[in-house]
Image (tube, rainbow, N blue to C red):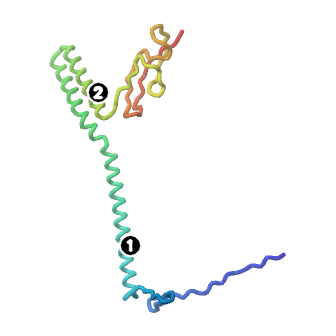
């Protein structure tokens, strides 16, 4: 059995140029009904140029929108921390005042109290921005929020309980910014 190659010959399509316009065929209507044909263009080349002009204007407008949206997005990322920084500046001012007061006055208790107030102010700023301290002392060890730096035997704490916090950890909403560094109890 042999296969014959079949070739498909398509009739040549007429080419239209500016001097030759092909008129569309009139629509055939079912019996008793008349079909309306759209009015013929008065100057199809002018309409084509106008449509091309509208297309180019729309493309330019879309391109401008994309550039503006990208610029606004980058500005949003660039200045996202502005509210946090504005809240931190008074804390820095208070630290500067405490250092200045310590230079003038040798009262260590007043300096200690000043730094406690600044520490509390800083904690409040962090809370306003949804950054909270991870409470770890006497809590069961959780590797998701704690980083064990050491294990010690203890009779006072059950096994795998945080005995000492060496560095406080913080989380932003539900994401850990920095885990708490802790010493964990173990059984002997």
The quadrant the C terminus occupies is top right
Question: Where is mark 2, residue-wise?
Answer: 123
Q: Please tell me how crowded label 1 is: few (under 14), some (14-19), or many (20+) other residues with Cα within 10 Å.
A: few
Count of numbered labels shown in the rendering: 2
Q: Is residue 85 left or right of residue 155?
A: left
Q: Position of residue 136 (x, y in %)?
A: 40, 21
**What residue sits 40% from the left and 18% below the top?**
137
Q: Position of residue 147 (x, y in %)?
A: 46, 24
* Residue closest to the far left: 104
Q: Position of residue 43 (x, y in %)?
A: 37, 87
**Compared to 167, does 19 lie above or below?**
below
Question: Where is mark 1, residue-wise?
Answer: 55
- Marks 2 and 1, how far apart in space? 56 Å
**Compared to 23, does 149 lie above or below?**
above
Q: Please tell me how crowded label 2 is: few (under 14), some (14-19), or many (20+) other residues with Cα within 10 Å.
A: some
**What residue sits 21% from the left and 14% below the top?**
109
Residue 60: quarter of image: bottom left
**Quick one: label 2 or label 1, which is nearer the N terminus?**
1
The quadrant the N terminus occupies is bottom right
Q: Position of residue 174 (x, y in %)?
A: 40, 33
Residue 130: quarter of image: top left
Answer yes or no: do the residues labelled 2 and 1 have beta carbons within 8 Å? no
**What residue sits 30% from the left and 40% below the top?**
81
Q: Which mark is residue 167?
A: none
**Compared to 141, does 176 lie above or below?**
below
Element at label 1? helix
* Residue closest to the far front: 32
Residue 45: quarter of image: bottom left
């Amino acid at each position: 059995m042999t296969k014959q190659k079949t070739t498909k010959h398509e009739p040549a399509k007429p080419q239209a140029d500016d001097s030759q316009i092909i008129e569309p065929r009139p629509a055939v209507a079912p019996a008793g009904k008349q079909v309306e044909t759209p009015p013929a263009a008065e100057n199809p080349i002018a309409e084509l140029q106008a449509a091309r002009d509208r297309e180019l204007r729309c493309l330019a407008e879309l391109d401008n929108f994309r550039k503006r949206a990208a610029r606004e997005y980058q500005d949003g990322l660039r200045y996202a921390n502005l509210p946090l920084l504005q809240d931190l500046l008074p804390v820095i001012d208070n630290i500067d005042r405490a250092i200045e007061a310590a230079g003038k006055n040798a009262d260590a208790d007043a300096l200690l109290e000043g730094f406690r107030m600044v520490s509390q102010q800083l904690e409040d700023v962090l809370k306003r921005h949804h950054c909270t301290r991870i409470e770890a002392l006497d809590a069961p060890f959780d590797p998701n929020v704690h980083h064990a730096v050491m294990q010690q035997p203890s009779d006072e704490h059950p096994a795998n309980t945080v005995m000492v916090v060496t560095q406080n950890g913080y989380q932003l909403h539900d994401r850990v910014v920095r885990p708490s560094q802790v010493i964990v109890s173990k059984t002997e």
